[in-house]
Structures are given as structure tokens and as C-alpha cells.
Amino acid sequence: MVIDFEATTPTGHPAQPIEVAALALRYKEGAWTGAGRRASLIRPPAFAPVTPAVTAQTGLTPEQLSQAPGPAEALGALDRRFTADKPYLLVAQHAATEANIIHNQREHCPALARIDLLDTIPLAKYIIPGLPNYQLDTLLAHFAIKKPANRHRAYADVDVTAQVFVRLVSAADEDAQLSDLAALVKIAGRTAKCNMPAQEELFDA
């Protein structure tokens, strides 16, 4: 499940989500196919207003988000996607960001908060070393994936992140040391904070 958040970053508080998108992928008969998607705006709390900088980056305005569902409703609806008895792995670009948002919102999405993550950045560093950086735009250019016009909207970024992930997995197939998903997780996996022992969580950056 590829996931992406857009967020505000209020001083003195953790990032607050203002949009989430998730795209389920399934590998079947030699190809990756979409297996469902969900996207929602999320109304931020009063202490985390949408700033002009956020609007400039995402195009989202305070007026739009004032009518959006709150995190309990938006993330609760997404969380119900994970109640089925199926193994999931979350995939994200710079997964630490998504991991922290999910953990801080875990009361609204307890099932989601217990899913481990795969970060496309360390995976890309291993598979395609030598790039000037591993930002999403750089990876899009490397793989000749068209940059979406609405870049920095969650539903657009999740689509192109999924394309990057598929290209990385395809490249990994050519490496004999990367024979299965477990090998990719060893390189680029990130344990969900809810799955960490309590003492490790205290010291986790």
C-alpha cells in the first residue's frame, strides 16, 4: 500500500495531516496492478492553520480544508481498509514522515499504525547509487516518469511514488542478492513505532 500525506508543520507541535492518499498494489501474473485507492482532505486543528507557504506548495487553501472531514473521520475510513486479515506493507517516499504522522494519529487509525513501512529512498540509494540526491523529483527524472502538474498533492504524489516503487522492484530483480521482499525490507524497511519495544520508542528519533 503506497501512502502519502500532505501536512502543516505548526511550531511546537508535530506535523498535522491535511491530505492523505493510499494506493494498493498487487503483484499477479507477472505484473503490478492497482487494487484500490483512497484519498481524502483532512481538516487540521486550530493550532495548525494552513499557511501561505503550504498553500503555495500544495494549492490547498484554508477555505477548502475548513469543510474537510477531521482526522478521526478521514483516517478512520482509511484504517478500515486494513481490518481484513491480509498482510500489508506500507511504501512511502521518505517514510519517516509518514511513519511519524501515522503514529501521532494512531488513536484514529490503530490498524494502520501497526503496519511496517518500506522507504523508497534507501531502496533507491542501494539499487541506483550515484544520483545527486534521492528526492522524488530526482527519481522521477531518472526513471523518465512524467512529473504531475499537481505535484505536492497526496493523490498525485502517491501515484508517482508507486511508479518509482515498481521501477525499483523491477531493477532489484536483476540483483541476485535481492531475491524476495524480505531482502528489500532488510535494506529499506522501517518498523512502525507501535511495533517497537517501549524502551526503543523512547529513544527513536
Image (tube, rainbow, N blue to C red):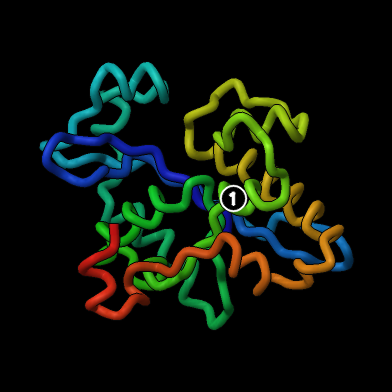
Q: Position of residue 34 (x, y in %)?
A: 70, 55
- For image coordinates 77% across by 29% down, the residue present is 144
Q: Quadrant of residue 201?
A: bottom left
In this view of the protein, can residue 4 be seen by the observer? yes
- For image coordinates 47% across by 64% down, the residue present is 190
Looking at this view, name the residue that lies furthest to the front: 130
Above or below — where is 70 with respect to 102? Answer: above
- For image coordinates 53% across by 64% down, the residue present is 189
Q: Position of residue 30 (x, y in %)?
A: 88, 63
Above or below — where is 54 with respect to 13? Answer: above
Identified by mark 1, the residue type is Thr
Above or below — where is 177 with respect to 168? Answer: below
Q: Position of residue 200 (x, y in %)?
A: 28, 73
- For image coordinates 63% across by 53% down, the residue present is 123
In terms of depth relative to the viewer, which is nearer, 57 or 11? 11
Crowding near pointer 1: few (<14 within 10 Å), some, many (20+)?
A: many
Q: Position of residue 22 (x, y in %)?
A: 52, 52
Number of marks: 1
Above or below — where is 156 with respect to 76? Answer: above
In terms of depth relative to the viewer, which is nearer, 133 or 9? 133
Residue labelled with disc 1: 120
| Horizontal side of residue 39 vs 187, given as left or right | left
Q: From the image, which quarter does the C terminus lie in?
A: bottom left
Question: Label 1's element?
Answer: helix
Q: Quadrant of residue 174?
A: bottom right
In this view of the protein, can residue 156 be seen by the observer? no
